[in-house]
Amino acid sequence: MAESTVPRIRTSRTLPTPRARLRYRIVVSTLVVLAVGFTFGLLAWDNPMPVGSDGFWRIAELRATNVVVMAVVAICQAIATVSFQTVTNNRIITPSIMGFEALYVAVQTSAVYFLGVAGVLAVKGLPQFVLQIALMVGFAMLLYGWLLSGRYGNLQVMLLIGIVVGGGLASVSTFMQRLLTPSEFDVLAARLFGNVSNADAAYLPVAIPLCLVAATLLVLGSRRLNIVALGRDACTGLGLNHRRETMRVLFLVSVLMAVSTALVGPMTFLGFLVATLAYQFADTYDHRYVFPVAALTCFVVLSGAYFVMRNVFYANGVVSIIIEFVGGLVFLFVILRKGRL
Amino acid sequence: MTALVGPNGAGKSTLLTMVGRLLGLDAGTIEVAGYDVTRTPSKDLAKIVSVLRQENHFITRLTVRQLVAFGRFPHSKGRLTVADEEVISRAIDFLDLTELEDRYLDQLSGGQRQRAYVAMVLCQETEYVLLDEPLNNLDMRHSVQMMKHLRRAAAELDRTIVIVLHDINFAGHYADHICAVKDGAVVEFGTPAEIMTDDVLTRVFDTPVTVVDGPNGPLAVYY
Ligand SMILES: Nc1ncnc2c1ncn2[C@@H]1O[C@H](COP(=O)(O)OP(=O)(O)O)[C@@H](O)[C@H]1O
Ligand SMILES: [Mg+2]
């Protein structure tokens, strides 16, 4: 055998064999091709002008906002979920359980409840957008403060409190929704399903930098995240301050989740779906390799779903419902297969 | 090499994790190599003392070699050099894991995984090494090999090893010092010859123990 005479190169790199490297490259290339394809499809499909003409670009430009929003949401959801799962040491968790979405729903509902149909307009606009992000990050920081201050406060307690507070907010929202007139409720309902067209191009100058800065900081900390994934004790033993690292990651995750939620509304299972797929696709523990695959996968799922829904089923509004449905199914499947939480 | 022995719940793990600054102290101070473990920055301590806990949770899709490589983190911050790779290879060979180095952790038996964790800790190249029951899950051959490896590490690599042992006979044979812990306090400290007596062992373990002369030194018989 010719192969066995070649001395094996002993290396600890993430993808040690040529086969693993090839596989990773194929995965990334496929995702990139799909992403480019769907982007082009969303911009150009059904575009009445010939490709490349002035009119074509003008129409494409109008649609480009949606694509940019998808890219922002994809980066936010993918990076936030993967990081959140690492610091919580749990692969079936999604950061939305921290109450971001409940807070978003509560804000939207109270606006309509107190101000009527005009309320939807009252929470639209750049200052309101920034305020919502600040509110969500502030809410998350309050929870984390609990984690920091209390001697007995730990991550599990914090998550539990997040769920309880989120549940409380959701009940209050539901109660207020009951008291709305049907037309008010109709207006509100459209805002409560995550939808890319909820986003206003005016938000992007704030959303894009926030998303990029937070995501970049998390991606640059990949090597440290790999250590955090080993658990608190191993992490401390290797000289990394586990608590500080956790706080840093949770803060950045809350920024990303707040941006995504304030931009398009709730996307509960999208992050989970994408993180699960990304670990399957990337087939490695190393965040440096998982992050790009997760973000690309997220963009492909979002843009693909919109493309298919818009051009095949002519049903733009139900995209998030479909994604959530598929994500929920995957979630159940993973739980049933693992047999535990 | 110092062995920590004592009955279940005596506080051996607690003591060891406190020395390894994984657990905070209620009172008092602990110094390792002259450094106060609660005051010295954790990243500096990581080059002085390494610690392996009794239970370790493992992450998926991680090979033995990649796990061991994490031991270099205090030195390389995750950017491995050629020198790092050599240290990793040595630690893997040292623990007889050469054939298994590209296996994923979830494809290993408990004992093999245990050895991988010990290799990771040795790879950290600290003067002080703290190990909590590293013989857990190991069969006879690998228990003996592990103790021999650790003795060699102590002698050749000049490491100071503190190890929690379940089996008093392993402590008696391989350790230079034995520290007996009971009810949260150190009750005895001495050489194996001083500790391996009917009297001391019966007192520490609260069960009748007879020490007999075996072919390779004293043996505690307690059944
Ligand atoms: N010095 C001490 N004073 C009071 N309680 C202690 C002390 N040391 C340990 N404990 C308690 O004893 C229990 C068992 O300790 P552990 O270290 O796990 O025992 P083992 O010797 O079996 O490893 C723990 O719950 C710990 O909190
Ligand atoms: Mg113990």
Image (spheres, grey):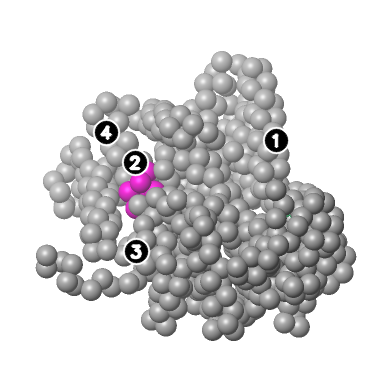
Q: Nearer the viewer, mark 3 or mark 2?
A: 3
Mark 3 vs mark 2: tell me if same chain.
no
Residue A279 part of the magenta-drawn span: yes
Q: CA distance from mark 3 to mark 4?
A: 49 Å
Q: Nearer the viewer, mark 1 or mark 3?
A: 3
* Residue designated by label 3: B99
* Residue designated by label 1: A165
Q: Earlier in the sequence, mark 2 or mark 1?
A: 1
Picture layout, residue A50 above or below residue B101: above
Q: Residue at x 53, y 64 (%)?
A: B144
Q: Which mark is residue A308?
A: 4
Q: Which residues are magenta?
A: A277-282
Q: CA distance from mark 1 to mark 3?
A: 51 Å
Q: Position of residue B131 (x, y in %)?
A: 63, 65
Q: Residue at x 46, y 29 (%)?
A: A336
Q: CA distance from mark 4 to mark 1?
A: 37 Å
Mark 4 vs mark 1: tell me if same chain.
yes
Answer yes or no: do the residues labelled 2 and 4 have beta carbons within 8 Å? no
Secondary structure, magenta segment, majority class: helix
Q: Chain of mark 1?
A: A
Mark 2 is on which residue type? Val
**Going by the image, does A55 lie left or right of B163?**
left
